[in-house]
Amino acid sequence: MARRDASAISPTAYYTSAVWLHHGLSHPAFAHLNSHLYYYGLKGPQMAFKLLGGPTLDDFLLARHQIIDHELDAAIRDEGITQVIEIAAGLSPRGWRFAERFRDSLTYIEADLPGMAERKRKLLKHGGIDSDHHHVLDIDAFASDGASLEAIARTLDPARGLVIITEGLVNYFDTDTVAGLWTRIAAVLKRFSKGIYLSDLHVQSVNQGMSVQAFMGALSTFVRGRVHLHFSGETQACEQLLASGFDWAQLLTPSDYRQILPDCNRSGADLVRVVKARCGALPSAHAPS
């Protein structure tokens, strides 16, 4: 399994930071010059894909981001979960936004490879948007000791519940690696009174057709690595989540949110699914029929 360079910022991290900013979701502190260069540099190719009936990056990036925001907000407001670990947060503004929204009632931890984590800490400080309840820590999400997910989770209060988020991470690793990560996340969440996992995921059944395949090929070139489509469909993905130790799992479809989240109306939004998996008892409103 190839690991990312701990000191480098990926093209997708730069690009997504510009997407969030241009759509009113971020703070200018998170947008580097390279972010704007990537964003405007991809305008032409994206327009070409759109004219050919294909998707654009923004379509599913915005859909997945806003669904994860929506589900995280519900976990905090409706279920009283007050701790979050976001793995590989990169230049995402979510930690800042939720720390601003909920202030000292929420503990938000962003965890990333050391180089990226140090850059994020500096951006928060220089932008004047750091806070006592928003932390950026070093992590190796695939490690079992040292700067591991388990070590970070041990610093938290099991009674306050925990949401773990991986956005923009799992499709860059092979299926065995993802299954191992899911097993580790489920084991951590089982130690908390309530545990929810949120992630984006691309599955084969909704990423077919010549235009989509061409787009995925172009995306692999852009991210400088293979984009994996691990599972044939939603059922197989949920089966793997359950086998990894979660007690309940569902893949959320962006178009189901189109009445409340406008970006889920985008033509390419349904190329992505959002994983919502749980450890522990389900609230009655979420109990499967």
Image (spheres, rainbow, N blue to C red):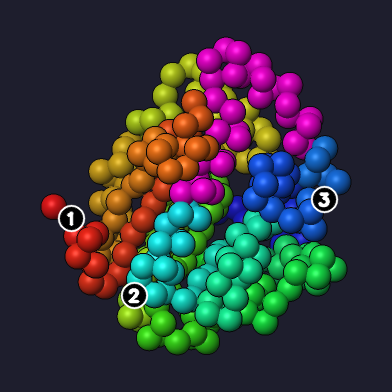
**Picture disc at residue 288:** 1
- The reply to whether residue 52 is visible in this rendering is yes
Establish if 221 lies above or below 211: below
Whether label 1 touches label 3, CB < 8 Å: no
Residue at the spot of label 3: 32
Judge from the rendering whether residue 5 lies leftward or rightward of residue 183; answer left or right. right
Q: Earlier in the sequence, mark 3 or mark 2?
A: 3
The part of the chain drawn in magenta is: 38-67
Establish if 11 lies above or below 279: above
Q: Earlier in the sequence, mark 2 or mark 1?
A: 2
Q: Secondary structure at mark 1?
A: loop
When asked about the image quadrant of residue 89, the answer is bottom right
207 part of magenta stretch: no
Q: Nearer the viewer, residue 67 or 7?
A: 67
Q: Quick one: label 1, few (<14), some, or many (20+) residues within 10 Å?
A: few
Instruction: Please name the amino acid that badge 2 sits on.
Output: Lys
Residue at the spot of label 2: 194
Instruction: Please name the amino acid that badge 1 sits on.
Output: Pro
Instruction: Please name the amino acid that badge 3 sits on.
Output: His
- The reply to whether residue 184 is visible in this rendering is no
Judge from the rendering whether residue 192 lies leftward or rightward of residue 266; answer left or right. left
Q: Quick one: label 2, few (<14), some, or many (20+) residues within 10 Å?
A: many
